[in-house]
Image (cartoon, rainbow, N blue to C red):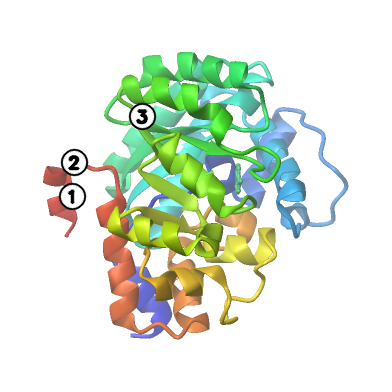
Amino acid sequence: MDLDQFARALPKAELHLHLAGAVNAQTFLKLARKNNVPLPPFQHIEDLYRYDNLVDFLQIYDLVARSVVDADDFHLITYEALAHVAKAGGRYAEFFFSPQVHQDAGISYETMFSGLLKAMDDAETDFGLVSRLIPAINRELTIDRSFEFLDRVLPFRSDKVIGIGLDYDEEPFPPAPFKPVYDKAKKAGMRLTAHAGEGGPAANVRDALDLLSVERIDHGYRVIEDPELVVRCIDDNIAFTVCPSSTVILTHWRDLTAADHPIRAMLDAGLKLVVDTDDPPMLQTDLAKEYRLLGETMSLDRRTLADLALNSLDAAWLDDSVRRDWR
Ligand code: ES4
Ligand code: ZN
């Protein structure tokens, strides 16, 4: 069995995937045409999935999101994204979606959730992939908007809609101001995670833990700049959802073979890492490829890759009775 086959066969969970970033280019084109969304000029639609920084990426991400309009569109992109996870050997998925960009295009939360939740059911029936949804706050918008997000999301809280996240550009938008929103979400029974320490400093990781009370950190690479915080995260068993291809394309850590790549440093430090995709087709990847890429570039043996896969099951927000079935 070669490494690709091994990575594909490993039982693993996807815990960091953005729905609008998981739309394949052909589906993007189809939906943009159907819904009369103007696109920039291109030769091949895949050309629009090229960028080398987060800000440019997020512009295309928003354009993809704007192409998703009715409940059937939400069903289509969710079903295809989950099929893609299953094809890469994902056994379970927790995924983000960004309701505010759709809301700004005039789409109701009822429309979004009806298509999404139906597709999650269908994926479970048709190919056995269990999934959970984590609506995420666009941190570039106001705190008032994030309270509004929460008020609109909470009525949908269920065994399928289980938590909230915080995404978009971290560097100018640190986590601390979102504390009251996270407090309210926690009181309402939501699980909590946030993107931190990707574009922003280690202090953002600390603030996400201390102020937002998150249980996991998305990316978190710059935690490595604060050795005391690293020790604390190890002691507290905090999982970091790291995305290898995403670092290469969207950050300045371009070389996964470099001794100072933060994922290498996080592994060496003994932090609990979960390997994820972020935005699979928009970053030309899938979950198995991320494991293989990490294995190849960081010379990880199969035992280590299997341990990473086990981390993904441990860090999943499943209750223990369900988790036992996946082992
Ligand atoms: C995102 Cl910060 C970030 N990275 C990758 N994909 C995203 N989608 C929304 N925010
Ligand atoms: Zn992300």
211 over 311 or under it: above or below:
above
Marks 1/3: CA distance? 18 Å
Please name whichever residue, 38 or 270, is drawn nearer the observer in this view of the structure: 270
User: Is ligand 2 closer than 8 angstroms to the Cβ of mark 1?
Assistant: no
Q: Residue at x 60, y 25 (%)?
A: 100
Q: Which part of the image, by quadrant, shows the N terminus?
A: bottom left
Q: Residue at x 66, y 51 (%)?
A: 25
Mark 1 = which residue? 323
> Could you classify mark 3 by the number of other residues whose Cα lies within 10 Å: few (under 14), some (14-19), or many (20 or more)?
many
Whether residues under marks 2 and 1 lie with C-beta atoms below 8 angstroms apart, the answer is: yes
Q: Mark 2: which amino acid?
A: Asp
Q: Which part of the image, by quadrant, shows the C terminus?
A: bottom left
Q: Quadrant of residue 148?
A: top right
Marks 3/2: CA distance? 14 Å
Q: Dot 1 lies on which element?
A: helix
Mark 2 = which residue? 319
Q: Mark 1: which amino acid?
A: Arg
Q: Earlier in the sequence, mark 1 or mark 3?
A: 3
